Amino acid sequence: MSASGDYDVLVIGGGPGGYACAIRAAQLGLKTACVEARPTLGGTCLNVGCIPSKTLLHATHLLELARDGHMAGFGIDTGPVSVDLARLMARKEATVASLAGGIDFLFRKSGVDRLSGRARLAGSGRVDIGGKSVTAKAIVIATGSLPTGLDGLQVDNDAGIVVDSTGALSLPRIPGRLAVIGGGAIGLELGSVWRRLGAAVTVVELADSILPGMDADIRGTMTKLLVRQGMEILASTGVSGAEIRKDGAILKLRGAEGEVSELAADVVLVATGRRPNTGDLGLETAGITPDMGGFIPVDARGRTVVDGIHAIGDVTHGPMLAHRAEDEGIAMAERLAGRPGTSNSAIVPAVVYTDPEVAAVGRTEESLRAEGVAYRASTFPMLANSRAKANGSTEGFVKLLADEASGVVLGAHMVGTVAGTMIAEVAQAMEFGATAEDIAYTCHAHPTHNEAIKEAALGLFGAAIHS
Ligand code: FAD
């Protein structure tokens, strides 16, 4: 490990933004180091985000299939099913450890120097890491984000009563009652995990429905489906206070009309969002001032106001998603190596890994209407998709939006068991500037869920075959 010395590129933060940036920079021949404060690489995503949550979601989906007779319709009867929470958590940890080791391997393979410790800017071009000074021609800040708290609700993951997403990924026992504050992706995914494990889950959401900001049909469909699965959802409801006890909490709730009620829970998950992680980064030493939300202001090329200091991923404005961070990291490395390096902030798919999954890319009908853009919409139900029917999972739909005049695809919104995988087709089509016809006349394998996208595209010019 190189503890000091000059680098072409020094990346601060080893999350999906930072590590991808470092690997690509090294591949392109730049002398690169990546400094990470955690013992393991992979950032929020790998350590306490995407990967552990998806491991738990997958495992608890299997549990539900086996336990609740979902396979009986196929003639498969299961016996009594039990969960060993400790083994489930051990599997999650092993998955994380294995992938983290993979990034170390990739660093060695591509020649990235891994530096350990907390980095602090010490002026332009210089970074202090545990008392040692490292200089670099280009510094890339990729320090990610942290959970936001809620006034009056002190998160204490060790005590395990009021927890954030990190605590909710490692609860030592299954709570009888889990209150989830916040009906966004993280709240619904972790709420699903613990509901499947046996907790009575209540989601409290301040907006008028879960998944605020997403397509209205997605919000309505998912509310219906999650309630049917047993999740209680209190929309238009805020938390106005809390009494924390040794063995649980009583939340004071306030509805849209000002009505007051109480919600008792053994564990409260605060999933109200995330904030950029810029604390103690020494931004002021370099002359960088975070904006009102704490984000590092950058231009379209990720440049801060200071020459040679750049920022990518969650620490900058944009959707707080691992693939956005990764794309920006790769594009940044390519620009630093003198290549064009682009990432498209208009086409960033968003996925919620509930069952069924939710996926969206591009514009919503709401935003198009607000801007007065003339568009066409076509919706195809998964009920009419032969693969979904064969699999016995017909919930959901694909909605495609296209420009009225040109037919260029403007957005897609879907609910379906594999919507998170399907959305890539539309994202790629949009990257290529595709029209509805381009998608509709592309041969799709049969029987696949993606045929629902083709049918929705055909429907945009009145040619859907199966609906
Ligand atoms: P991060 O991943 O946050 O990495 C930043 C790294 O910088 C951290 O490892 C941190 O320790 C390090 N660091 C910070 N300050 C310093 C310093 N001064 N010196 C050295 N190191 C420092 N996104 C998805 O796309 N899909 C999902 O399914 C998904 N699921 C999620 C589930 C949960 C529960 C959570 C919490 C998040 C999820 N996300 C998901 C969001 C995703 O994790 C983030 O968008 C992504 O990790 C951001 O990447 P990043 O590289 O910008 O920052």
Image (spheres, helix red, strand yellow):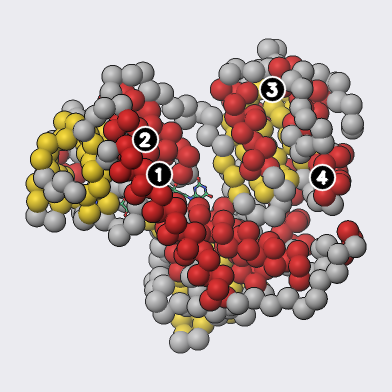
The residue nearer to you, when weighing 344 against 178, is: 344
The residue wearing badge 2 is 329
Q: Secondary structure at mark 2?
A: helix
Q: CA distance from mark 4 to mark 1?
A: 33 Å
Cβ atoms at labels 3 and 2 below 8 Å apart: no
Q: Which mark is residue 54?
A: none
Please tell me which residue is depicted at 76% across the width and 71% down the height of the picture: 67
Q: Secondary structure at mark 3?
A: strand
Select label 1 or label 3 by which is in front. Answer: 1
Q: CA distance from mark 3 to mark 2?
A: 30 Å
Relative horizontal placement of residue 434, taking residue 301 as reference (left or right)? right
Please tell me in which quadrant of the rendered image residue 367 appears.
Answer: top right
The residue wearing badge 4 is 388
Cβ atoms at labels 4 and 1 below 8 Å apart: no
The residue nearer to you, when weighing 366 against 350, is: 350
Q: Secondary structure at mark 4?
A: helix
Select label 3 or label 2 by which is in front. Answer: 2
The residue wearing badge 1 is 16
Cβ atoms at labels 1 and 3 below 8 Å apart: no
The answer to whether residue 171 shows anywhere in this view is yes
| Residue 411 horizontal/vertical position (percent) | 64, 29
Tag 3: residue type?
Ala
Mark 2 CB near ligand 1 (8 Å cut): yes
| Residue 305 horizontal/vertical position (percent) | 22, 30
Mark 1 CB near ligand 1 (8 Å cut): yes
Q: How many marks?
A: 4
Please tell me which residue is depicted at 22% across the width and 49% down the height of the picture: 115
Precedes in sequence: disc 2 or disc 1:
1
